[in-house]
Amino acid sequence: MQQEELFPKTPGRIGTDESGKGDYFGPLVVAGIFLPEGQEEVLRELGVRDSKRCSDLKVKELAAIIKKGYPHAVVAIGPSRYNELYQRLRNLNRLLAWGHARVIENILNEVPCPLVITDQFGDALYVQQALMKLGKSVELIQRVRAEDDLAVAAASLLARAEFLRRLENLSAEVGIELPKGSSALTEKAGLELVQRFGRSILDKVAKKHFRLTERILSLVPDSTA
């Protein structure tokens, strides 16, 4: 049975959120789910809450359940593509708007839903304009601490689970555990990577506009490839 048939024009809302925005290594991930009206209690009983309040293991467990139960979409922008887009746009909010708009569009292609709730990351006009370019129109509500809404909380879990999966894969590729966040441990790992593989490795694993890039590169000789 198609998901459209499971929830045919059911009143509800789409919630979207992102992960990786504050992490130096790994992708930027935007995710969203369609939550039909009356499903809040189901998510509440499952223990769905903002991913920042869950362990990595719990994030993965809840995300797997949510994926099976609800129409959803995930858009991941790997470091190489992220750096290209950021170099062109020079504005993280516009990049986020593109990601959120694409996720919303993908869900709307499955389920008609006029209402979208997302976290406050910039001018809502960015997302509206991106949606208009894609031929979509919705009522968009941006909220501070939108993760208090269960649809957004569920989206945050999907986004974080995908971020963690891709960061683990990236760590395996380079042979170094890439820490989450942006800390002294992150700087140490970045320095080790550059010393092993050269400066260009940061294009493939990191969000280079972070100030951490300057600190890492200042610690290695200019002759490092």
Image (cartoon, helix red, strand yellow):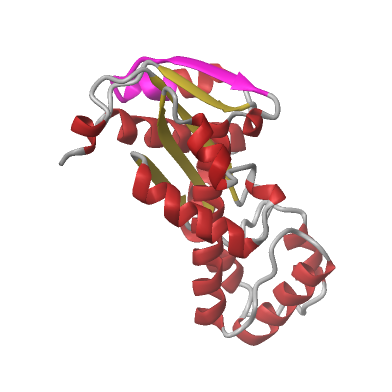
Q: Position of residue 193 (x, y in %)?
A: 66, 79
Left or right: residue 164 versus residue 103 is right
Q: Quadrant of the C terminus?
A: bottom right
Q: Going 30% across and 28% down the picture, which residue do you hit?
A: 108
Specify start and end residues of the magenta stretch as a single range.
Answer: 129-143
Compared across the picture, whether 138 is left or right of 194 comes to left
Quarter of the N terminus within the rendering: top left
Q: Residue furthest left?
A: 1
Residue 179 picture quarter: bottom right
Q: From the viewer's side, name the closer residue of 195 and 42.
A: 42
- Was residue 140 drawn as part of the magenta stretch in this picture? yes
Examine the rendering and report whether any part of residue 198 can be seen. Answer: yes
Using the image, determine if residue 76 lies above or below residue 134: below
Q: Look at the picture and state if 47 lies above or below 80.
A: above
- Residue drawn at the location 49% of the way across and 49% of the way down: 158
Q: Is residue 115 left or right of residue 198?
A: left
Q: Residue at x 52, y 22 (%)?
A: 126
Foreground: 50 or 21? 50
Q: Is residue 6 magenta?
A: no
71 or 131: nearer the eye?
71
Position in image of residue 54 (x %, y %): 67, 54
Q: Is residue 89 visible?
A: no
Instruction: Residue at 26%, 19% (x, y): give it.
Output: 9
